[in-house]
Image (spheres, rainbow, N blue to C red):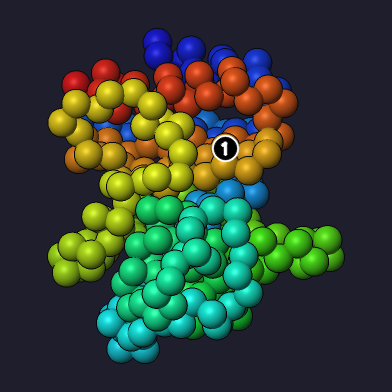
Amino acid sequence: MMIQNLHNQLVKSHSEFAFYFEANNGQPPVFFSNCEVFSSASVIKIPLLLAWAHLERAGEVDQREMCCLDDEPQVQGAGFSWMLHARRLPYHDILMMMISLSDNLCTNLVVQRIGLERVNQIFQDVLGLEHTRMQRKLMDLAARERGLDNWIGARDCIRFYQLFDQLTPAERAWILPMMCVQADCLLMRRIELDSLVFYHKPGFIPGVLHDWGFTDRCRIFLLTQKVQDQLPMLEIFGQAGRLMVEGAE
């Protein structure tokens, strides 16, 4: 009933959406959408984190390597690394701020370290993502005006869960703590989750709201774009979040 009500409200919102819910109780997952490709709104940072994990496993990058915050233009929009007095940090801290603060400068530094072309090659050939692409760095308004943007696929977001399952225990040990201290925006985390830990990555830009994540009881995401009225959509995200407690019991 809750999921059917959620679907009805999404349809009435006249937005583009994709919703996924899978409880760890043996029941088949629920997936419905009216769109496949979405503006990334920060969720692109999840496959970027997975790409780093792949490269570190292969010995090509190292979280302990030092990164200079001044090696990229000092973009703002999210995060506060551009204000730090310390200008050299290990990449572990850069990755942490990319995920937990959605820091745009840190994200661009990760992209610079890997290389934009290599990022997309890993997305497609290693991670097996069909519609997830980075065409520009974050806050690059000139590139956006040329029609370049960053995209995620709804079914790719399901694939993310399989990729997390493939992480080694050591990789999960440093990745998961970054994902449960989100300071970006609440969305599905607006409800009280009691003892549940929600590992997730929300994202918000005008007209686009996303939240992707999981608990030890379920996997859930809601992607929306072309949102005409933000306040009712925030209520829908709150209802989706309640599934993590009520739908997983």
Q: Relative to residue 20, is residue 100 depicted above or below? A: below
Judged from this view, the residue extending furthest toward the front is 85
Residue 32 in sight here:
yes
The front one of 97 and 155 is: 97
The vertical placement of 29 against 112, above or below, is above
Quadrant of residue 150 within the rendered picture: bottom right
Can you see residue 156?
no
203 on left or right of 193? right
* Residue 191 drawn at (x, y percent): 34, 23
Give the position of the C terminus as an image quadrant.
top left
Position of 3 relative to 54 (above/below)? above
Q: Secondary structure at mark 1?
A: strand
Q: Where residue 181 sits in the image (x, y, percent)?
A: 30, 47
**Is residue 137 rendered to the left or right of residue 22?**
right
Horizontal arrangement in the rendering, residue 114 relative to residue 91 (left or right): right
Front residue of 105/53: it is 105
Residue 1, x across and y down, in percent: 40, 10
Characterize the local packing of mark 1: few (<14), some (14-19) or many (20 or more) Cα atoms within 10 angstroms.
many
Q: Residue at x 65, y 16 (%)?
A: 12
Residue at 68%, 36% (x, y): give it: 207
Instruction: Please give the residue where the numbered disc 1 appears in the rendered image.
Output: 209
Q: What residue do we see at 38% from left, 53% from top?
A: 100
Lateral position of residue 36 relative to residue 246, left or right: right
Q: Considering only vertical position in the picture, is 126 above or below 208?
A: below
Image x and y of residue 42, in percent: 53, 52
Picture residue at 42% right of the left edge, 19% below the top: 239
Residue at the far right in the pictured view: 146
Residue type (three-letter) at the residue carrying disc 1: Leu
